[in-house]
Image (cartoon, rainbow, N blue to C red):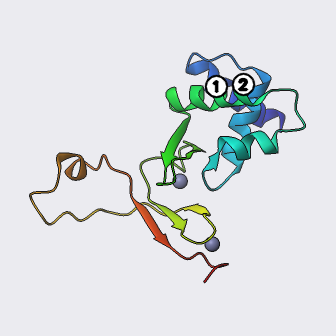
Amino acid sequence: MAKNVEELRTALRTRGLRATPSRLAVLELLRAGDSPVSHGEVADRLAAQPWDRATIYRNLTDLSECGLARRTDVGDHVWRFEAVTAEHDGAHPHFVCTECGTVECLPEIELAVRRAKAPRAVRQRQVEVHVRGLCDACI
Ligand SMILES: [Zn+2]
Ligand SMILES: [Zn+2]
């Protein structure tokens, strides 16, 4: 645990961010999760802590801007945040349940672009891929 916190502190400091208690808690929460979470979900999970929701939102934004986290909108106009780590980096697709709204990370896939006419962003893989369907609980 102590080693983990030290690692989080170093990650923040090497990106020029002060390792405030709320930033550490938000980063730790994102790293512990295996799917993207919304600001509301993060705030709910840290509700026992003294920080207000605006502080937590700023922390999420700071972490995204410095590259320790990534923001994704899977199409419901809600920003969801996930940690960027060595094991969980690069753009990967997300699965979105059309029934309950659950979002899950999917393994990286190679986007096979056969049409030369595809937009440049697609050819350069600068796109987000969202897959929709029913999750195991809803099927
Ligand atoms: Zn579902
Ligand atoms: Zn993800």
Circle 2: residue type: Thr
> Is residue 23 in view from this perspective?
no
Q: Quadrant of residue 79?
A: top right
Estimate the x, y position of residue 73 in percent, counting from the top left.
49, 48
Choose between 22 and 19: the one closer to the eye.
22
Circle 1: residue type: Arg
Q: Quadrant of ligand 1?
A: bottom right
Residue sitting at the far right: 48
User: Where is the C terminus found, in terms of image quarters?
Assistant: bottom right
Estimate the x, y position of residue 56 in percent, counting from the top left.
71, 30
Residues packed near mark 2 inside 10 Å, few (<14), some (14 to 19) or many (20 plus) = few
Question: Residue shown at 56%/47% (left/top)?
Answer: 78
Choose between 52 and 113: the one closer to the eye.
52
Left or right: 16, with 20 as reference point: left
Question: Residue shown at 76%/37% (left/top)?
Answer: 4
> Is residue 16 in view from this perspective?
yes
Q: Is residue 15 above or below residue 46?
A: above
Q: Where does label 1 land, which residue?
A: 58
Residue sitting at the far bottom: 139
Q: Could you tell me if the residues under marks 1 and 2 are in contact, i.e. CB atoms within 8 Å?
A: yes
Residue 127 is tagged as none
Q: Where does label 2 land, which residue?
A: 55
